[in-house]
Amino acid sequence: MLGSWAAPVPARPVGPFAGAGRVPVVVELFISEGCSSCPAADAALRELVRAQAVPGVEVIALGEHVDYWNRLGWKDGFSAPAYTARQRQYATSFGTGSYTPQAVVNGRCELVGSRSADLVATVSKAAKVPQAVVSVAVLGSSAQVRVSSLPAGTAATEVLLAIIESGLASQIGCGENAGLLLHHAAVVQQLLPLGRVGADGSFTASPALTLAAGWKRPNLRVVALVQEIASRRIVGVATTSVVSE
């Protein structure tokens, strides 16, 4: 655990595409390497993040690989029951079933992830909703997360920390995508609950970062999410690299 801050924490997230006035918007993509419809959605989200072409917005991708396709011929090495459970929480909120590829934008809207034009429009709309002030930094082996100024009317919220890795690809040996080399949008390698935001609308935490040996540190980012517990709406987000920027 590290000591006090060496410098004030920026109010805006620090990211590769962040600029003055850019609003961060999270796109969670629930996919599986065993699903033949998913590569197109992966490609659409990768391009959206690469281009950062939505005016005034920083798109943050969270690729969450579900495990319910694993029994159908190919086991997705990035899949985990936790992401399946998270998708089911969204399904309950939206009144839909779980499917792939499903994109969820700021926890507020869901759509088929391969529909690029609809995705851009949904991201643009989500950016207009007021957000909390969130900051995240990495100092040594710890992340530093701060939350304040929740939007008026926000219900009980929790703070989550995701570790994501970009540049990942898999050669698929069997199943619906047999023979394909699949390139992924940023994959969620870890998703941790940090706690609830206080009654005064503030939160501070310094969780230790545990990085697996196989993860490529230059490709890692941490993402802090502030999410309403009941509605699942994301009301604030920030991201930064694991290495110095």
Image (cartoon, rainbow, N blue to C red):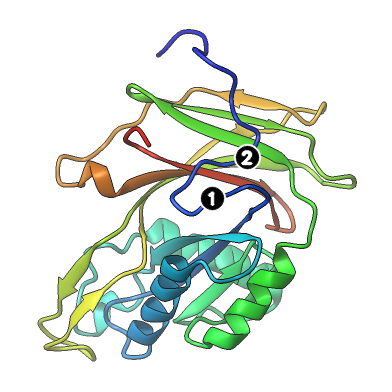
Q: Is residue 203 left or right of residue 58?
A: right
Q: Position of residue 133 (x, y in %)?
A: 71, 38
**Quadrant (top left/top right/bottom left/bottom right) for the N terminus:** top left
Residue 29, above or below 192: below
| Numbered marks: total | 2
Q: Position of residue 137 (x, y in %)?
A: 48, 30
Under circle 1, the secondary element is loop
Mark 1 vs 2: CB contact within 8 A: yes
Amino acid type at circle 1 is Ala
The residue that appears at 60% across and 39% down in the rendered structure is 159
Residue 150, above or below 66: above
Residue 44 bears which disc, if any? Answer: none
Q: CA distance from mark 1 to mark 2?
A: 8 Å
**Quadrant (top left/top right/bottom left/bottom right) for the C terminus:** top left
Instruction: Please indicate, yes or no, whether residue 35 appears anywhere in the rendered image.
Output: yes
Instruction: Please indicate, yes or no, whether residue 224 appears anywhere in the rendered image.
Output: no
Q: Give the quadrant of residue 148.
A: top right
According to the image, label 2 marks what residue? 12
Q: Position of residue 220 (x, y in %)?
A: 32, 46
Q: Is residue 151 left or right of residue 158?
A: right
The residue that appears at 65% across and 41% down in the rendered structure is 158
**Quick one: which residue is furthest to the front in this view?**
20
According to the image, label 1 marks what residue? 18
The residue that appears at 63% across and 76% down in the rendered structure is 110
Q: Is residue 149 left or right of residue 101?
A: right
Amino acid type at circle 2 is Arg
Q: Is residue 39 left or right of residue 100?
A: left
Q: Give the quadrant of residue 175.
A: bottom left
Q: Position of residue 227 (x, y in %)?
A: 66, 49
Under circle 2, the secondary element is loop
Nearer the N terminus, badge 1 or badge 2?
2
